Amino acid sequence: MTIRAVVFDLDGTLVDSLPDIGGSMNQVLRSLGLPPHPLSAYREFVGEGVLRLVERALPPGFAAREQAVAAFREVYGARLTAESRVYPGIAELLAGLEARGVPCAVCSNKPHGMTERVVRALLGEASFVCVEGERPERPRKPDPAAALDVARALGVAPSEVAFVGDTKTDMQTAVAAGMQPVGVAWGFRDRAELEEHGAALVVEDPAELLAWAQAAGPGA
């Protein structure tokens, strides 16, 4: 197995965005006269796009779902990175991959414009070949379409790409795209979920991921 490129999920992998995502949805819930959730609950709500997030946060059978989705987009768009932070060690990981000539990209289920804004605001120093979020014309992860678009942009065969993420959605995406599924233990879900859904490797910290990528690189 040779790894020539790395594709990262965004939320829960590169960036801890839970305070902004959960805080925004809780603001919407309060505005609708509904009780908020503890932030920890959003660990299970995120990962499959805005619609699924809102559906999970709302009570079953709630009638004004579209209103809630629109409200979330507005509220979250206004505070996008107010409390979000890059995970410790990520800057060093990205710099290390760049120094070794390993091209990197981002592939997220966050709406494309928001994905670009978060990357620009929090990871602006990183040199990503491409940044892809959810687009209306393309199915969301775990459908492999976005990941395969990214592989084409990288100019690397899918089998030589490590797809790195923190949820079953990311592992399923990697498997469907024919990429190497790599889970991160510092994100929103646990090791058991990642391994159950195909992770070939679960790393405990970014330094371990860098060492693995170096060992699996061309000529290693």
Image (tube, grey):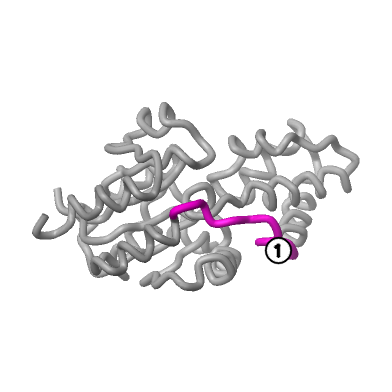
Q: Residue at x 50, y 35 (%)?
A: 189
Which residue is situated farthest in the left direction here? Answer: 219
What span is in magenta?
Answer: 78-89
Give the residue number, with chain letter if any, for mark 1: 77
Residue 119 appears at what percent x and percent y? 53, 66
- As drawn, 188 above or below 73: above
Q: Residue at x 54, y 45 (%)?
A: 48
Q: Locate residue 4: give its quadrant.
A: bottom left
Residue 201 appears at what percent x and percent y? 29, 38
Residue 208 appears at what percent x and percent y? 32, 45
Question: Is 188 contained in the magenta span?
Answer: no
Residue 160 appears left or right of 35: left
Quadrant for the C terminus, please: bottom left
**Quick one: 158 or 193, which is closer to the camera?**
193
Residue 72 appears left or right of 138: right
Q: Secondary structure at mark 1?
A: helix
Residue 48 appears left or right of 75: left
Residue 60 appears at what percent x and percent y? 74, 31
Density class for disc 1 (Cα within 10 Å; few <14, some 14-19, many ≥20) is some
Report the predominant secondary structure element of the magenta stretch. loop
Q: Residue at x 82, y 43 (%)?
A: 29
Q: How many marks?
A: 1
